[in-house]
Amino acid sequence: MEFPVLGTLHIAGMTRIELTTMLKEKISIYAKDPIINIRLINFTVTVIGEVSSPGTFTIQSERISLPEALGMANDLTIYGQRENVLLIREVEGKKKFAKIDLTSVNAVSSPIYYLQQNDVIVVEPNNARIRSSNYNPNNAIIISALTALTTIVAIFLIR
C-alpha cells in the first residue's frame, strides 16, 4: 500500500485490526486521534455442490453469514444435504475443514456461521442423489432400441 507521507507499507498477511493499529501509530505523528476505516473491496466466497447456482460471489459488505451465502447461490437443491454442509477455510496457510448442520438451532452460534475471505462452502448430495447418479439416463433409450430390434427380428423370423 502506498501513502503520500508514510511511503510504501507492506500489509500482506495482516488482519484488519493489526493494520488499523499500525496505521493509527504512524498517522498519529501527523494527526491527533486519527480515525482509521479499513474496508475489504474484494471479499469473495465460493459456494459449490448441491445448490441451484454454484459459483464465486463478491460480497459488498464485510460480513456475511452462511445462510446469506447459500441464498446468493439460490439455496440448496432438493438433493442438498442440510445436515452436513462443509466449510473449507484457510487459516495461517493451512486448510481447515468444518461441518455444520443447517437444521440445528445451534448453527447460529457456530464459529463458522459468519464467513471469512475466500471461504468455500460445499453442499454435499443426499442419498437420493447419490443413488440416482448410478442410474444412466440413457438406459431407457438403450432398452427401447433393444426392444424395437427384438420385435423386428421376431417379425422376420415368424414369416
Image: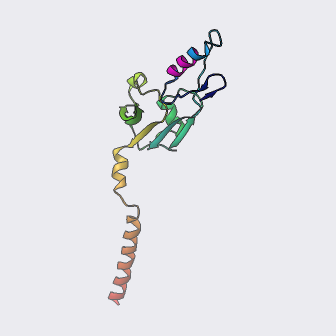
Image x and y of residue 135, in percent: 35, 58
Q: Nearer the viewer, residue 8 or 125?
A: 8
Q: Is residue 14 visible?
A: yes
**Which quadrant would residue 140 be assigned to in this image?**
bottom left
Taking the view exactly as shown, the residue that stands out farthest to the top is 32
Above or below: residue 36 compared with residue 121: above
Q: Check the picture and name the quadrant holding the N terminus.
A: top right
Q: Nearer the viewer, residue 144 or 38?
A: 38
Q: Nearer the viewer, residue 159 or 114?
A: 114
Q: Chief secondary structure of the magenta span?
A: helix
Q: Residue at x 33, y 56 (%)?
A: 134
Q: Is residue 77 visible?
A: no
Image x and y of residue 100, in percent: 38, 31
The number of discs equals 0
Q: Which residues are magenta?
A: 17-24
Image x and y of residue 152, in percent: 38, 82
Image x and y of residue 36, in percent: 60, 18
Q: Residue at x 54, y 39 (%)?
A: 57
Visual colour scheme: rainbow
Q: Residue at x 53, y 26 (%)?
A: 63
**Which quadrant would residue 7 be assigned to in this image?**
top right
Q: Check the picture and name the quadrant holding the C terminus.
A: bottom left
**Residue 108 is one of the magenta-drawn residues:** no
